Image (tube, rainbow, N blue to C red):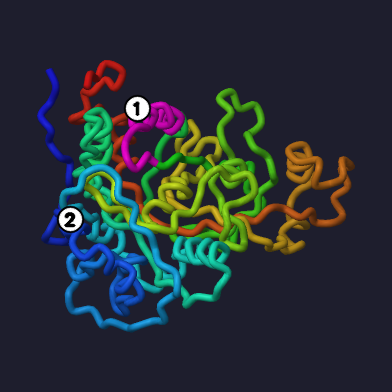
Amino acid sequence: MQAEHAVQVPGSPFTDPGPAQCDLEENANDINRNMHYVPHDLLYAPQPMPANGNSILARDDATWVPQAQPDFAYTLTATGSNQTALRANLPAPFTFYIPREYVEVESIIPQMIHQKLVDLHGMPMPPPPFFNMPDTRLYAQFISNFCLHKDDITRRYYTKVPRNPCFPDDLQRPRIYPIQLLKQLRKSLERYKDAFPEPLPMVIIRNSEVICMNPPRWYMYGVIVHVPPTEHPPNSEDLEDTLWSMSLKRGVSASHKPHSGCQSSVATSPVRFGNMFYSAEELTYFNFAVNVFMEIPTFPGYGPKEPIAAYKGAFILNVIDLPMHPAYWTKLSEDRKMDIYKRAPQLFGGVPTFLNCPKFPAINLHFQNWDMNLLGVLDDLKFGTVDDTLDAGQYEE
């Protein structure tokens, strides 16, 4: 017998848990006229913006700063229902605990969209506003109007949350999981692949693949990691992704364009799908963001005996041109240098000479979100499933 559709939602600091509603059919053409007004003092400022701005934004008393309007128009793509659309407008819970300046620094998605529009239209434009994700739990209200299976999978995934609230303690004390459990997570996420938006993939940064980090102690927010260009850890039975291989799949280049070989695309227009409205920033986030875990060093006779990793958040992987300082290379032991040579002999010209520092890829991880839905699935694996008796293969429309 299936459990009732109980929603797992921990206590939140905001009072209105539902999305704002706006009628995108009414005055739909106004989207092009109103999009160039940017809320100056809002934490969440989607761009481009739907016509009914006051319903979309979290506050009505924003200070409006007019900016130059580009000559071209955004296209509002309508798909599915013609009824009033819902919009996930409430900020993600982590934004209540992180200073705004950190959110602004990590905001790379508007730069990606800005660059795509410049490339498409060949014209200069004003800098875009910064962006951070809305509360993804609001996506659970999605109704496609054509696929009950997709609706149900979406509701089940986006109502997943951790058993214990994430904030504020987790900002200083990250959640730690056995790596063996994280390997199971990949398979568990497969059952939710039909959700919309599709759950983000994950990667575990292994100690063995990190040459150096800047800053050297990674607490939260962004970090730059130099890694060897290898696509799988040595002796990996399940072809586990490395940070580099995930960057090839979902990363962006220093010019804010999809990295060479990346299969994802940057969205430039808002999309209406079913009963939900998604901004270009949200769609781009789900096309590129990756959930990142960092392996924690273990020592003989101290701490856990099995490999463990800490959850760091969801990031955009930005491959940048930043040579590693030679001092980091000289500090490495000869054994470590030989290990790196075996992983990436092409960096040395096939000859194990270690006098000069090789040119290692540098990946700048831009913090975007704290993926509570993924952490909810992890808690299901650890403690047992709650309200998720669906067998996707047996679901009948």
Residue 349 at what x, y percent from top left? 87, 45
Q: Is residue 255 visible?
A: yes
Quadrant of res 397: top left
Judge left or right: residue 122 versus residue 42. Answer: right
In the picture, which quadrant includes the N terminus?
Answer: top left
Q: Is residue 171 visible?
A: no
Q: Nearer the viewer, residue 268 or 355?
A: 268
Residue 392 at what x, y percent from top left? 29, 22
Say above or below: 233 vs 227.
Answer: above
Q: Find disc 2 in the rendering and name its residue.
A: 19
Q: Which mark is residue 133?
A: none
Judge left or right: residue 287 versus residue 173. Answer: right
Q: Earlier in the sequence, mark 2 or mark 1?
A: 2
Cα–Cα gap, marks 2 and 1: 26 Å
Q: Is residue 183 magenta?
A: yes
Q: Which mark is residue 191?
A: 1
Q: Residues within 10 Å of mark 2 (few under 14, many from 20)?
A: many
Type of the residue with mark 1: Arg
Residue 245 at what x, y percent from top left? 61, 41
In the image, which is nearer the foreground, mark 2 or mark 1? 2
Q: Nearer the viewer, residue 121 or 242?
A: 121
Judged from the image, the secondary structure of the residue bearing numbered disc 1 is: loop
Magenta residues, as a range? 181-199
Q: Nearer the viewer, residue 180 or 389?
A: 389
Q: Residues within 10 Å of mark 1 (few under 14, many from 20)?
A: some
